[in-house]
């Protein structure tokens, strides 16, 4: 998704193509396990190539240190001039500035593992990335923390030890590429670039990384075993009432069995002895218990828990069933179900952006609205605020920001527009209240993340996150619709690009998805407490069988994991928020996309091959409870006009016309939200809106041809407006854009 001042989502495709915030892949875990068996390589086995490492004290070079030279002619979007021996001035001229160091003339000493240099910079350099060449690939790179501005000479170090050892880098002829953030107009002085040995702090950090990796691999193995086990016992129902919970199930075998409670901050597969449990006396049981219980200083709502049967042992308990979440939740009120009356919507809508008339003129029936509760949530009274008590703890929500959100919601509600709220959790450094940041930033968050996975690892953080969701649901899921309505919830952003957009550090996919599904379930259960029609959507880029950042983090594999969890732990009504941008976001002629093929193993799903997504969502194994098609919103999409020239504007509109003609035939796709609907200067050169830049010199905010095509879509004027774009696409009839062969 593209970033702008109101719409905080951004597709990783833009991230890679525009801002050069590149992320290397997570190494294959089978390789990691083998590496762990070798003690000398244990600490390098599974770290992601572009993982961020902390800054550590610099060891001053000895007289024998060998400084490295920059290749003066190697600059990409960066001007290089040599000032003195081993000292250079760099001026960045674009958003992808990088350069090369001289190739090694002899083998790199085995203890030279940390790249160190001194620098001055006119402003923050940002995140640097070091490539160990050759070849130059994301898998052979390391990213840094943010490199700050410095008016005097400062030292900076980047630990390359894991990659040097893992990749066997350092032979004569090998070299390094240094990427200097993504800002043009920087002036950087750099000198005394060299490789040195690890100091004590770096050795300790490497050891800590190795331990974390070991724990993650163990958790991944446990989760995989859990999901692939055929259990002899079953929890068949978890029904949540107003004040009580009823759980039904059965177990088999001899011994002592208990019904055990798993809270969001528990890892089921890592528990050896269950604490929160109720003994079972009959193989077929129906157990009632209080819904609310005082625990860890909070009035805990067991709506958030899942339940499992365990055979109790003297030293360890044995899980004998899948855990199960609530299946039926008695809501506090009755609300009518609502679906978009057409597929036409807008993404990232906010009333503060102006052009409210577009909702009417374009006949919009659905919108997405970005909500960052961390930008207006406090643990203590802060100015004018709404108080909200959850778990017997009161939190505060800034009144002005909430009322601004009210206006957006009411603008949609008054027009019968269906709203999906996109829930985004900011890193601690961006939260309005540092204490909220401390509670909600995931403990494994790394600073390359634009947003964080919510922290659900302790009771205090769980209560805080649940309180934020409960505040939103209680306000925007009311039977009187006083403040407007949230119908559905898009959980975070582009999780297949998780290091960037929903960051919890470098994790195995199954570990990451286990946490993501916890977040989805928490929101789902809280929302369903107020509105039995609420759905949660999982958010993905246009990747499918190919990964964006990390092998195994593909939309297809992650959705398969979501399906598996739903089958194991009780299905819930989740849907899909898919971002089917063209393969190249700058190129509107999506019918030329090379990696969008008509196969369930296609690398990408773009506008060209939406038929693949339509096929997948209707497959029997992907249906909700085996019979109901899950909701699919193309929740962030658009075609670009490279410039405002007549031809570029025409191609942008043609790209939409091509897409809409497909959508009309695809009953598995329920809605399409155009993003960004107004051109924005902060989108790296894209002109992806239906309207021009608001500060355009000739026609500020003016309607582009694609605006009129969007207006005509689904009306009697559609073909009259669309037909001029057939020649751009290269067709005679619109039927030619639809792929009708069965997709395998």
Image (cartoon, grey):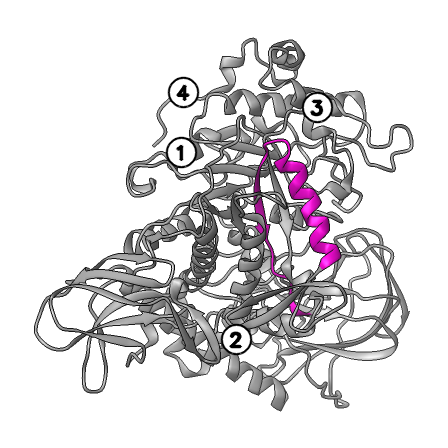
For label 2, the SS is helix
Residue marked by disc 3: 361
> Which mark's residue is nearer the viewer, 1 or 3?
3
Is the C terminus in the top left, top right, bottom left or bottom right quadrant? top left
Residue 739 falls in which quadrant of the image? top left
Residue 599's disc number = 1
Q: CA distance from mark 1 to mark 4?
A: 12 Å
Report whether 691 appears left or right of 25: right
Q: CA distance from mark 4 to mark 3?
A: 33 Å
- Residue at image x 39%, y 37%? 617
Residue marked by disc 2: 460
Is residue 272 part of the magenta span, yes or no? no
The answer to whether the residue labelled 4 contacts the one labelled 3, judged by CB atoms less than 8 Å apart, is no
Residue 250's disc number = none
Residue marked by disc 4: 740
Q: Who comes first in sequence, dot 4 or dot 3?
A: 3
């Amino acid at each position: 998704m593209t970033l702008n001042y109101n719409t905080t989502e951004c597709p990783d495709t833009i991230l890679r193509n525009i801002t050069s915030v590149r992320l290397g892949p997570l190494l294959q875990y089978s390789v990691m396990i083998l590496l762990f068996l070798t003690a000398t390589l244990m600490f390098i086995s599974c770290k992601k190539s572009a993982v961020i490492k902390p800054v550590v004290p610099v060891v001053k070079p000895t007289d024998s240190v060998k400084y490295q030279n920059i290749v003066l002619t190697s600059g990409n979007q960066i001007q290089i001039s040599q000032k003195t021996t081993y000292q250079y001035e760099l001026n960045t001229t674009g958003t992808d500035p990088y350069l090369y160091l001289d190739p090694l003339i002899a083998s790199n000493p085995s203890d030279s593992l940390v790249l160190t240099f001194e620098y001055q910079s006119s402003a923050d350099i940002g995140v640097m990335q070091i490539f160990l060449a050759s070849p130059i690939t994301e898998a052979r790179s390391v990213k840094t923390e943010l490199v700050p501005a410095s008016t005097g000479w400062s030292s900076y170090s980047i630990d390359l030890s894991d990659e040097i050892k893992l990749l066997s880098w350092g032979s004569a002829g090998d070299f390094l590429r240094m990427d200097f953030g993504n800002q043009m107009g920087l002036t950087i002085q750099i000198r005394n670039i060299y490789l040195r040995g690890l100091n004590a702090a770096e050795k300790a950090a490497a050891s800590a990384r190795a331990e974390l990796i070991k724990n993650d691999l163990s958790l991944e193995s446990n989760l995989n075993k859990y999901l692939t086990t055929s259990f002899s016992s079953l929890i068949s129902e978890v029904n949540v009432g107003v004040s009580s919970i009823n759980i039904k199930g059965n177990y088999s075998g001899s011994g002592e069995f208990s019904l055990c409670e798993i809270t969001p901050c528990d890892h089921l597969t890592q528990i050896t002895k269950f604490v929160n449990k109720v003994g079972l006396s009959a193989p077929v049981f129906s157990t009632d218990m209080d819904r609310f219980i005082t625990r860890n200083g909070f009035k805990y709502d067991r709506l958030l828990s899942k339940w499992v049967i365990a055979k109790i042992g003297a030293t360890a308990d044995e899980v004998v069933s899948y855990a199960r979440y609530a299946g039926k939740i008695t809501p506090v009120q009755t609300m009518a179900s609502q679906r978009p009356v057409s597929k036409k919507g807008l993404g990232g809508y906010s009333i503060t952006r102006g052009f409210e008339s577009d909702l009417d003129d374009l006949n919009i029936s659905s919108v997405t609205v970005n909500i960052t509760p961390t930008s207006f949530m406090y643990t203590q009274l802060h100015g004018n605020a709404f108080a909200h008590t959850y778990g017997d703890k009161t939190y505060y929500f800034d009144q002005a920001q909430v009322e601004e959100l009210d206006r957006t919601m009411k603008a949609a509600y008054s027009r019968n527009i269906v709203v999906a709220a996109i829930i985004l959790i900011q890193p601690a450094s961006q939260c309005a209240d540092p204490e909220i940041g401390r509670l909600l930033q995931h403990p494994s968050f790394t600073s390359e993340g634009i947003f964080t996975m919510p922290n659900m690892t302790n009771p205090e953080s769980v209560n805080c996150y649940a309180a934020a969701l409960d505040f939103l649901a209680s306000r925007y899921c009311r039977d009187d619709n006083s403040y407007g309505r949230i119908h559905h919830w898009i959980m975070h952003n582009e999780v297949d690009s998780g290091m960037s957009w929903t960051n919890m550090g470098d994790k195995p996919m199954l570990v990451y998805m286990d946490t993501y599904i916890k977040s989805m379930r928490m929101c789902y259960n809280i929302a369903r407490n107020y509105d039995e029609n609420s759905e949660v959507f999982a958010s993905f880029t246009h990747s499918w069988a190919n990964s964006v950042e990390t092998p195994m983090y593909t939309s297809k594999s992650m959705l398969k994991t979501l399906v598996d969890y739903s089958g194991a732990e009780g299905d819930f009504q989740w849907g899909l928020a898919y971002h089917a941008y063209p393969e190249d976001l700058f190129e509107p002629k999506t019918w030329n996309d090379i990696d969008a093929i008509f196969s369930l193993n296609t690398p990408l799903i773009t506008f060209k091959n939406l038929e693949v997504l339509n096929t997948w969502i209707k497959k029997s194994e992907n249906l909700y409870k085996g019979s109901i098609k899950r909701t699919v919103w193309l929740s962030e999409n658009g075609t670009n006009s490279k410039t405002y020239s007549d031809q570029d504007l025409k191609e942008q509109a043609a790209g939409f016309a091509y897409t809409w003609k497909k959508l009309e035939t695809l009953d598995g796709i329920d809605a399409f939200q155009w993003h960004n609907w107004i051109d924005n200067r902060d989108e790296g050169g894209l002109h992806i809106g239906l309207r021009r830049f608001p500060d355009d010199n000739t026609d500020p905010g003016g309607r582009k041809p694609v605006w009129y095509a969007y207006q005509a879509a689904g009306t009697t004027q559609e073909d009259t407006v669309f037909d001029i774009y057939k020649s751009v696409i290269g067709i005679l009839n619109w039927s030619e854009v639809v792929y009708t062969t069965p997709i395998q």
